[in-house]
Image (spheres, rainbow, N blue to C red):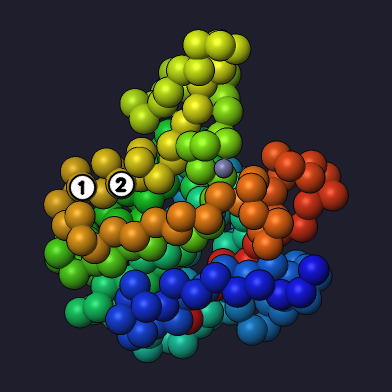
Amino acid sequence: MGIINFNLSNHFNDLISASVYSKKKSSLNENEFALPKQTHSSNVIFVKKPGIYENVDGLISSKKYKVPLIIQTADCVPIFIFDFKTRYYGIVHSGWRGTKNKILLNALNILIHKFKSCPKNILIALGPHIKKCCYEVDWDVAQYFKNIRLDKNNNKWFLSLSDEIKSDILKMNIPDKNFHSSEVCTFESNDCQSFRRDGLKSERMIGIIR
Ligand SMILES: [Zn+2]
């Protein structure tokens, strides 16, 4: 597989670069990037320099520090955040646990309360992830969400993480037009890494905002 790049920068009016691509994680250099050690937590921190950050699934920084932020996913949602007025930006890893525990709201609360963002200036884009067409879950997971659909034929639930995330950000008064979600489903697209599809053989998608 070559390197496929999903570019989301146009959603940010090219004021910041945001993309997701497939690449082996061994090539990521901690001297160059801010790399979270992800644990499906809802922890978000503010960083000013490259390095490895333990037990976090979301990073925030500002244009003035010029630090590229990385998140790694394989079906979970990579969320990109940018305030075009303050020039603060962030990246979040949101699977079902992160979405249930509102990790994105933790990131947005840091932007709004610590760095004086106005919700109307915050742009949000979701990269490729497993979509409601393919994200089958049991009730033990489905019970936490509203955007679920029951397939009565086999008694399975299908979950839309993007709809869950969208309804969370609308509650924060971020306008609908500031939200964008990739239509690419990682489970169906062979250009994507999918843990559901490929299990332990799967690599990771690298989300980067800089
Ligand atoms: Zn699908």
Quarter location, residue 206: bottom right
Kindly state the secondary structure of the residue where label 2 is placed.
helix
- Report how many numbered discs are placed on residues in the image: 2
Q: Marks 1 and 2: in contact by CB < 8 Å?
A: yes
- Residue at numbered disc 1: 170
Amino acid identity at mark 1:
Leu
Amino acid identity at mark 2:
Lys
- Residue at numbered disc 2: 166
Q: Quick one: 99 or 195, which is closer to the camera? A: 195
- Above or below residue 116? Residue 150 is above
Kindly state the secondary structure of the residue where label 1 is placed.
helix
- Above or below residue 8? Residue 184 is above
Q: Residue at x 71, y 75 (%)?
A: 3
Q: Position of residue 2 (x, y in %)?
A: 76, 74
Q: Quick one: 191 or 198, which is closer to the camera? A: 191
Q: Position of residue 175 (x, y in %)?
A: 17, 57
Q: Quick one: 61 or 10, which is closer to the camera? A: 10
Structural crowding at the residue carrying mark 2, measured as other residues with C-alpha within 10 Å and reported as few (<14), some (14–19) or many (≥20): some
Q: Residue at x 78, y 52 (%)?
A: 202
Q: Is residue 16 left or right of residue 5?
A: left
Q: Residue at x 24, y 63 (%)?
A: 178
Q: Residue at x 19, y 43 (%)?
A: 171
Q: Is residue 90 visible?
A: yes
Q: Quadrant of ligand 1?
A: top right
Q: Position of residue 125 (x, y in %)?
A: 38, 62
Q: Is residue 106 left or right of residue 199?
A: left
Q: Among all residues in the image, which is located at the extreme front?
A: 153
Q: Is residue 108 left or right of residue 21?
A: left
Quarter location, residue 22: bottom right
* Mark 2 → mark 1, Cα distance in angstroms: 6 Å
Q: Is residue 58 visible?
A: no
Task: Tell me, for residue 113, which label it has, or none.
Answer: none
